[in-house]
């Protein structure tokens, strides 16, 4: 009978030990999930930042192109007036499109 009692005590100790290991593993898993969530949050912020920088660079390039057109003194030559008018209309349409795109964000 004593042997049976020892066996039950040993089984109970093993069960408690397994429960402790299970708790440790679940705690580590939870910590890992929290760390992964924070990393994802940081990466999403970096992505938004890089998109903003890219859009800024594209906008600067676009403005620079149109400043060159605006500073072009060929307007003095009236032989190409229709072409210049068309360029101006295209510019206004592009500005309207960029405003719509910016407002949707």
Image (cartoon, grey):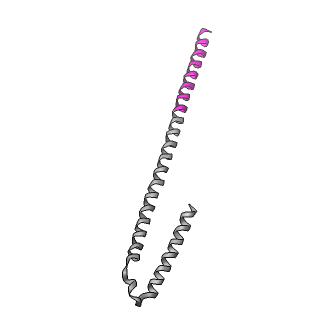
Q: Quadrant of the N terminus?
A: top right
Q: Quadrant of the C terminus?
A: bottom right
Q: Nearer the viewer, residue 41 or 10?
A: 41
Instruction: Give the magenta part as a residue range.
Output: 1-27
- Which corner quadrant of the image does residue 72 belong to? bottom left
Residue found at x 55% / y 25%: 20
Magenta span has 71? Answer: no
- Which corner quadrant of the image does residue 26 belong to? top right
Q: Residue furthest right?
A: 1
Q: Could you tell me what secondary structure mostly forms the magenta stretch?
A: helix
Magenta span has 18? Answer: yes
Residue found at x 56% / y 16%: 10
Residue found at x 45% / y 51%: 46
Give the percent coordinates (x, y) of residue 63. Answer: 42, 69
Judged left or right of residue 1, residue 68 is left
Compared to residue 88, the image places residue 33 above or below, namely above
Residue found at x 39% / y 70%: 64
Q: Nearer the viewer, residue 95 or 4?
A: 95
């Amino acid at each position: 009978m004593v042997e049976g009692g020892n066996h039950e005590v040993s089984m109970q100790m093993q069960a408690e030990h397994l429960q402790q290991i299970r708790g440790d593993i679940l705690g580590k898993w939870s910590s890992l999930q929290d760390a992964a969530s924070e990393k994802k949050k940081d990466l999403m912020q970096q992505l938004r930042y890089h998109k903003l920088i890219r859009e800024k660079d594209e906008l600067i390039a676009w403005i620079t192109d149109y400043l060159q057109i605006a500073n072009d003194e060929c307007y003095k030559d009236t032989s190409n007036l229709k072409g210049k008018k068309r360029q101006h209309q295209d510019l206004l349409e592009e500005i309207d499109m960029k405003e719509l795109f910016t407002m949707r964000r």
